[in-house]
Amino acid sequence: MLLITLLISIVACKTESKPESIIKEKKIKVFPQKLPDEKPDMELSAALNRLYDAYPAPKPQDNELFSQFKYTELKGFNYNNHDGTISRRDPSKVIFHNGKYYVWYTYRNTPTPPRGAKESSDVIPSSDWDLAEIWYATSVDGFTWEEQGVAIKRPEKPIVGWRAVTTSDILEWKGKYYLYYQGFMEASGKRGDDCPVAVSYADSPDGPWTPYNKIVIPNGGEGAWDQFSIHDPYPLVHNGKIYLYYKSDFGKKGDWIRMQGLATADNPLGPFTKNPLNPVISSGHETSLFPFKSGIAALVYKDGNEHNTIQYAEDGVNFEIAAISELMPYAAAPFVADAFTDTKNGRGITWGLSHFINLGGKGQFHSMLARFDCDLSQDINDPIFKEPRVKYDPEFYFKQSLTEKQKKRIEAVTEKLRN
Ligand code: AAL
C-alpha cells in the first residue's frame, strides 16, 4: 500500500510539475518596455536582429555614425549675380596648414552658361564642369573664404585634361601635396561624362603644382564597369597605403548607374591597383569617406538603392550600412584631420564643404559651394545632430509638386472610376 501511495505521489508530482515545465519551455518572452542596450536572448524578427547586428547602436541618438546635417552659406565667392557664367563645385577635402583652411574646387568662368555637347565649342561649355580649371581658396574660420586663384590650369592639347580639369581631391604624403583630378579630353556629354584621372604635385598647398601629365587612374578595360569614367578621386591613407576611392558612371546614357571603386598604391604617382571586389559601394555619387575607429566610413547619397546612408568598412573594402540619414551634403568635402596619418583610431568629422547644383534654372545652370556641419565624430556629442527628425515646413513639401503629366494621369484614373 505504502509503495502504491509513494508511486502515485511521484507520478502526481511529475504531472503537477509538467504544466509548469511546459509553460517554462514554451514561455513566450515579450520584447521589453525598456529598449535593451544589448541584443536580448530571445527570438527576434529580422528587423530587430538588424537593429542589433547592423547598426552601432539600437537608437540613432546613440549611433556615432548617425547624424543630421546643417548648412551655412559661404562668404567670399562671387557668382556674377548667378547668371551661370561662374560656377564652383566638387570641392576637395579641406586641409589645415599654417593656420588656415585650404580647399580646391572646380572653377568654371565662361562667356555663357553650359549649352550641351551639341552647341559646345572651344569657349561654350557643354556642361557645368566643361572648360573648367582647379582653383583654390583659404579661410581662417571655415565660413569666410579668400579665393587664391588657379591651382591647376588646363594643359595644352593633347595632354590629359586639355579640355577640362575638374573634381579634384588632395593627398598629403611624406611632406608633399598631390592633387588628383578628372582630366577631360573631350567635351563632357559627347558620349558620356568620360574621363580618366590625372595628378599634379607640389611642396606646398599654395603650389606651384607640377603636372604628372600622365593618366594615373586609368579607365577600365573593354566592357568593365569603369570603362568610360573615373570620377571623384578621393585619396586617404590607410593600412600604410594610399586608398583612392572613385566613382564610375555606367549603364546607358540618361539612365546612368553610379558606384564606387577603390584603387590602392604605395606611391602617389602609382601604379594604382584596382580592388578585385570593385565596385565596393553600390550607390552614391561624389562619395566622401573618412577614417573612423579602425576602419573607413562613407557618406553615400544621391544615387542607388543605398543612397542617404552612412556606411562603414572595417577593412575599407566591405562596406555595411551603419546609419540612414537625409538632406545629406552633395559632393561633401569634409575636413578630415586624420585623413593622411594612417590612423588606427579615426576620430571622424564635424564639418566640411559641399555644393548645390542646378542653380539659375534653364539656361543659367551653375553651382555654388556651401558649408555643412554634422556630428560624425568620436570627439564631440552634439545631440541636435543626433535627432532623427528633420523639421520641414509645408512649403518644402509643396515644392516637390506634381508635374502636369502626373496630374493628367491621376485625372484619368478618377475619370475611369466615374464611368
Ligand atoms: C560631379 C562628379 C564628377 C562628374 C561631374 C563633375 O558630381 O561626379 O565631376 O564628372 O559631376
Image (tube, helix red, strand yellow):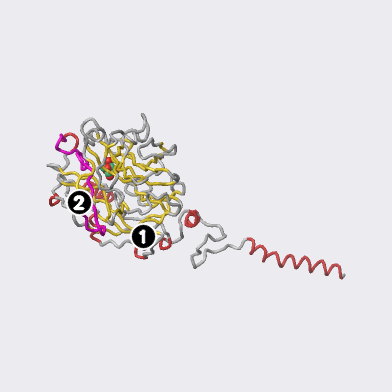
Dot 1 corresponds to which residue?
375
Amino acid, disc 1: Asp
Q: Local crowd at mark 2 within 10 Å, few (<14), some, or many (≥20)?
A: some
Viewer-closest of 96 and 89? 96
Q: Is residue 130 magenta?
A: yes
Please report whichever mark, 1 or 2, sits nearer to the chain's N-terminal start: 2
Q: Is residue 127 magenta?
A: yes
Viewer-closest of 350 and 141? 141
Q: Which residues are magenta?
A: 120-145
Amino acid, disc 2: Glu
**SS at circle 2:** strand
Q: Tell me where residue 212 sits by quadrant.
A: top left
Q: Residue furthest right?
A: 1
Which x, y percent locates residue 59?
Answer: 43, 61
Q: Quadrant of ligand 1?
A: top left
Which x, y percent locates residue 247?
Answer: 34, 41
Please, what is the dominant secondary structure of the magenta stretch?
Answer: loop
Q: Quadrant of the N terminus?
A: bottom right
Residue 14 in sight: yes
Dot 2 corresponds to which residue?
147
Which x, y percent locates residue 387?
Answer: 36, 63
Q: CA distance from mark 1 to mark 2?
A: 28 Å
Which x, y percent locates residue 201?
Answer: 30, 41
Mark drawn on residue 61? none
Identity of the residue drawn at 74% across and 65% down: 14
Total number of numbered labels? 2
Q: Tell me where residue 209 sits by quadrant.
A: top left
